[in-house]
């Protein structure tokens, strides 16, 4: 708590660290795997976790801003396709990286999301895993507005096992968030809230394209 108040650590990070620590000690004291039990008692059991702070306002794109972004020829076409797919499919970055041509049913225009890929580090060497969705998989009808894009992507990737979109990473200076912020400025989108992190709001990230999808649906 003192470190959070000194602005050396965010309260959300503190809660995440505490959650891992509490789970670690819980396993060390009473894991189902006997080999992990190295403590007689859990020292974290009756310890209160870090205080929660104020939630920062997150961002989403206005329709006019997305239109400017995906229409700007100065933004590379593969990135414009990624941004459009992220907003209109509402998929997470790892799910977009894992999408293949075979996951698009062009007869019924149903999108099947059955796996995700880790997007930290090189996306070409990323490991596949199940999506975060509780059911493990999900299928939904593609919006009419994104079907022409899906048609083009599927036609270009004739191999059903080919990736639908160019692989990308989310972290670091070459990550999708950095590119998104740069490309928005290139496209003439200058709304201050999208680029400035303050004590009350957070600048836009790539994951906020999924938030844009959810906001528009609502």
Image (cartoon, rainbow, N blue to C red):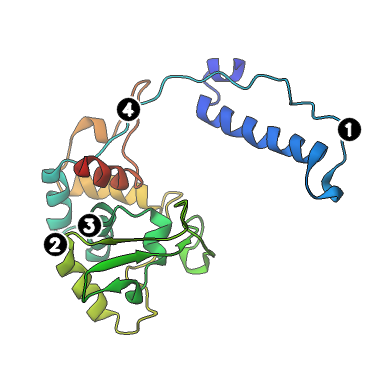
Residue picked out by circle 1 = 40
51 relative position to 205: left or right: right
Query: Does the CB distance between marks 1 and 4 fall below 8 Å?
Result: no
Q: Which residue is mark 4?
A: 57
Which callout, 2 or 3, points at the residue further toward the start of the chain?
A: 3
Alpha carbon distance from label 2 to label 4: 30 Å
Mark before the other along the chain sequence, 3 or 4: 4
Q: Nearer the viewer, residue 190 or 10?
A: 10
Which numbered dot is residue 84?
3
- Label 1: which secondary element: loop
Marked residue nearer the N-terminal end (2 or 1): 1
Instruction: Label 2, secondary structure: give it.
Output: helix
- Numbered circle sitting on residue 144: 2
Q: Nearer the viewer, mark 2 or mark 4?
A: 2
Quadrant the N terminus occupies: top right
Which quarter of the figure is the C terminus placed in? top left
Question: Quick check: 49 left or right of 123?
Answer: right
Q: Earlier in the sequence, mark 2 or mark 4?
A: 4
Marked residue nearer the N-terminal end (1 or 4): 1
Which residue lies at the image location 19% right of the left edge and 43% below the top edge? Answer: 216
Calculate the distance from the C-alpha at mark 2 to the C-alpha at mark 3: 13 Å
Q: Quadrant of residue 13?
A: top right
Q: Quadrant of residue 26?
A: top right
């Amino acid at each position: 708590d003192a470190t959070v108040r000194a602005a050396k650590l965010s309260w959300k990070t503190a809660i995440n660290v505490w959650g891992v620590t509490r789970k670690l000690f819980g396993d060390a004291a009473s894991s189902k795997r006997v080999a992990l039990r190295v403590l007689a008692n859990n020292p974290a059991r009756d310890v209160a976790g870090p205080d929660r702070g104020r939630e920062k306002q997150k961002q989403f794109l206005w329709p006019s801003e997305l239109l400017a972004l995906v229409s700007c020829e100065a933004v590379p076409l593969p990135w414009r396709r990624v941004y459009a797919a992220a907003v209109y499919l509402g998929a997470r970055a790892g799910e977009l990286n894992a999408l293949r041509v075979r996951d698009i049913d062009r007869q019924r225009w149903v999108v099947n999301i059955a796996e995700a890929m880790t997007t930290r580090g090189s996306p070409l060497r990323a490991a596949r895993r199940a999506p975060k969705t509780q059911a493990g998989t999900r299928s939904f009808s593609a919006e009419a507005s994104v079907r022409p894009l899906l048609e083009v992507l599927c036609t270009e990737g004739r191999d059903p096992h080919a990736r639908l979109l160019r692989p990308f990473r989310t972290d670091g200076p070459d990550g999708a968030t950095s590119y998104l912020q740069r490309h928005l400025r290139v496209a003439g989108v200058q709304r201050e809230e999208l680029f400035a992190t303050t004590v009350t709001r957070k600048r836009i990230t790539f994951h906020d394209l999924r938030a844009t999808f959810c906001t528009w649906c609502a």
